[in-house]
Image: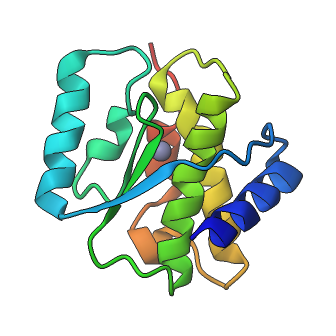
């Protein structure tokens, strides 16, 4: 896993200009039901910088906790498909944003680059967010922009 995370950091830093950091997050594998509970805890705490509720819709595939510097991946995640790896790439964007101390106007704003990186990663394999995650451009726009 460490080598994979290092490779992802290098890819994210060189493609998206994120601040490099090789102090990797913890990775935990949790059942889907636990994922929902974790998200609700975050929202319940009403922290400005908590894990973005934009990832709460429908099914939560993964989460990043900035305080614990932990990425939660779904049980059964094996990192064997472009889609699985793209989830990790998405959460690694949040980790680098966090440890790099980047500031955002709203939680959604953090998602813009995360989705962009995820889409770029998928495109390397001829995949995209629409076919792999049923996320169309409008959905992504809503999830990744400040509207108030
Ligand atoms: Zn995200």
Question: Looking at the picture, does residue 67 appear above or below residue 38?
Answer: above
Question: Looking at the picture, does residue 5 appear above or below residue 91?
Answer: below
Q: Is residue 18 left or right of 39 when viewed as pictured?
A: right
Q: How far from the left and from the top, in percent, is residue 78?
A: 42, 82
Q: Quadrant of the C terminus?
A: top left
Q: Is residue 22 left or right of 40 when viewed as pictured?
A: right
In this rendered view, identify the residue nearer to me: 14 or 57: 14
Q: Is residue 78 left or right of 40 when viewed as pictured?
A: right
Which residue lies most toward the right here? 14
In this rendered view, identify the residue nearer to me: 86 or 28: 28
Q: How far from the left and from the top, in percent, is residue 55?
A: 35, 45
Q: Is residue 94 left or right of 48 when viewed as pictured?
A: right
Q: How does the figure colour the protein chain or chains?
A: rainbow
Q: Residue at x 45, y 38 (%)?
A: 142
Q: How far from the left and from the top, in percent, is residue 73?
A: 36, 62
Tell me the quarter of the picture where residue 97 sits.
top right
Q: How many marks?
A: 0
Q: Quadrant of the N terminus?
A: bottom right
Q: How far from the left and from the top, in percent, is residue 19?
A: 80, 37
In this rendered view, identify the residue nearer to me: 6 or 146: 6
Tell me the quarter of the picture where residue 94 sits.
top right
In this rendered view, identify the residue nearer to me: 117 or 21: 21
Q: Residue at x 60, y 19 (%)?
A: 104
Q: Residue at x 57, y 73 (%)?
A: 128
């Amino acid at each position: 896993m460490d080598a994979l995370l290092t490779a992802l950091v290098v890819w994210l830093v060189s493609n998206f200009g994120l601040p490099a950091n090789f102090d990797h997050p913890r990775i935990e594998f949790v059942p889907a039901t636990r994922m929902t509970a974790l998200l609700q805890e975050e929202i319940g705490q009403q922290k400005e910088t908590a894990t973005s509720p934009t990832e709460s819709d429908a099914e939560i595939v993964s989460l990043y906790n900035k305080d614990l510097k932990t990425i939660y991946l779904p049980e059964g995640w094996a990192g064997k498909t472009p889609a699985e790896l793209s989830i990790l790439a998405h959460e690694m964007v949040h980790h680098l944003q966090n440890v790099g101390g980047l500031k955002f106007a709203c939680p959604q704003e953090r998602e813009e680059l995360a989705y962009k990186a995820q889409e770029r990663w998928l495109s390397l394999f001829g995949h995209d967010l629409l076919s792999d995650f049923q996320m169309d451009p409008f959905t992504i726009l809503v999830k990744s922009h400040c509207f108030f």
